[in-house]
Amino acid sequence: MNIKELKETVKGEVDAQRAELTELSLRIHDNPELGLNEVKAAQWLTEYLEERGFQLERGICQLPTAFRAACGTKGPTVAFMAEYDALPKLGHACGHNIIATAALGAAVAMKAVLGKTGGTIVVMGTPAEEIIGGKSFMVKRGGFAGIDAALMVHPGVRDTAITSALALVGLDVEFFGRAAHAAARPEDGINALEALIMSFNAINSLRQHIKDRARIHGVITDGGEAANIVPAHAAGSFLVRAEDDDYLETLRERVLACFTGAATATGARLEYKWAEGRYAALRTNLTIAGLYGANMESLGRRIYAPRNDRGLGSTDMGNVSVIMPAIHPSLAIAPLGVSAHSPEFEKAAASEEAHRGMAIGAKALAMTAIDLLAIPENLARAKEEFLRRGEAEG
Ligand SMILES: [Zn+2]
């Protein structure tokens, strides 16, 4: 089997789909849908795959907009992740339209060579990456059973093969106090907003004494009704992040203490709820990242080494990366300095540059799948690394 020829074939197959993939990407981009409501995107993506001979399962893992599309035979299974949710108000400011179409392009291209490589290609349609962490539920509900490795690309400002992402958990809080005339009878009131402000201040104090790279941030979603009424209700939404899952556990308790302390101090009653979906820290499989990086470089892109001074986000791909070998490389679609989750990035996600990147990402994903399916030692090495690190990191 000539690996080079197989790779040439998938490159040609991606180019042949380029116009249709770009059209689909723009359609998703121009119809942004929030997590778990990606009805149109899920429909368009599944139609594309079904028309090209993939076996579809829709609404898997009790998530109506999740899907699994498979094509192949005996042998190992490589999955490409599609994400397609948008952000509130900002639209596709995380460029998930590019993630979805790169996955589709790679999968359909692989169909042309599966007869030679053996194995199965799966596209996992994974909804609600931004809000609830759809993949965390899909992992819990067994949606990734039978998959040997999981690959995706995420748009960004640099081409990388290795990425890190922080473990994350969300926390919603409410304080219940007692309304009163703020001037005439303040002594009758219990100020729920003060409890929330005090919590913010306690978190600010805590922040001085937490590990580097851990993050705590939040917003007030209810801060009272009118200035002349002592706020009887206040609510906020927070995210707590850490470099590893153990430290996230430690931090969780310390953050919660900021709220319980404020409840005690003010007399307001606290109700809180930790988010059910939790994002695990991302564990990039270095074996697969190495293969992907070499493929990207053969396509004329320069791969940047991960840098420690750069900020990190979180991704539900972390949850996949702790159950199987996985990669979540960054794909340059916007100039340096443009931040994801900004109006500038939303624009970039519909640009010519983004779609050039999408096609290159699709090619690199398919070429990496060839490396894994056609050369069994590669997948064996990736699995061995996965097991070794699992033992070391717990
Ligand atoms: Zn994203």
Image (cartoon, rainbow, N blue to C red):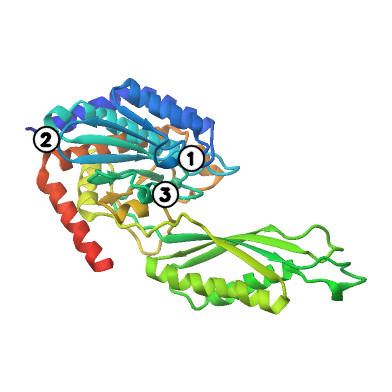
Mark closer to the chain start, 2 or 3: 2
Q: Which residue is mark 1?
A: 85
Residue at image coords 55%, 71%: 256
**Label disc, if present, on residue 137 of the rendered structure:** 3
Residue 192, horizontal then vertical, whole percent: 73, 67
Q: Which residue is mark 2?
A: 3
Residue at image coords 45%, 50%: 133
Identified by mark 3, the residue type is Phe
Residue 263, horizontal then vertical, whole percent: 67, 74
Q: Is residue 300 visible?
A: no
Identified by mark 1, the residue type is Asp
Location of residue 60 (image quadrant): top left
Mark closer to the chain start, 2 or 1: 2
Mark 2 or 1, which is nearer the eye? 1
Residue at image coords 41%, 52%: 315
Task: Between residue 149 and residue 338, name the one nearer to us.
Answer: 149
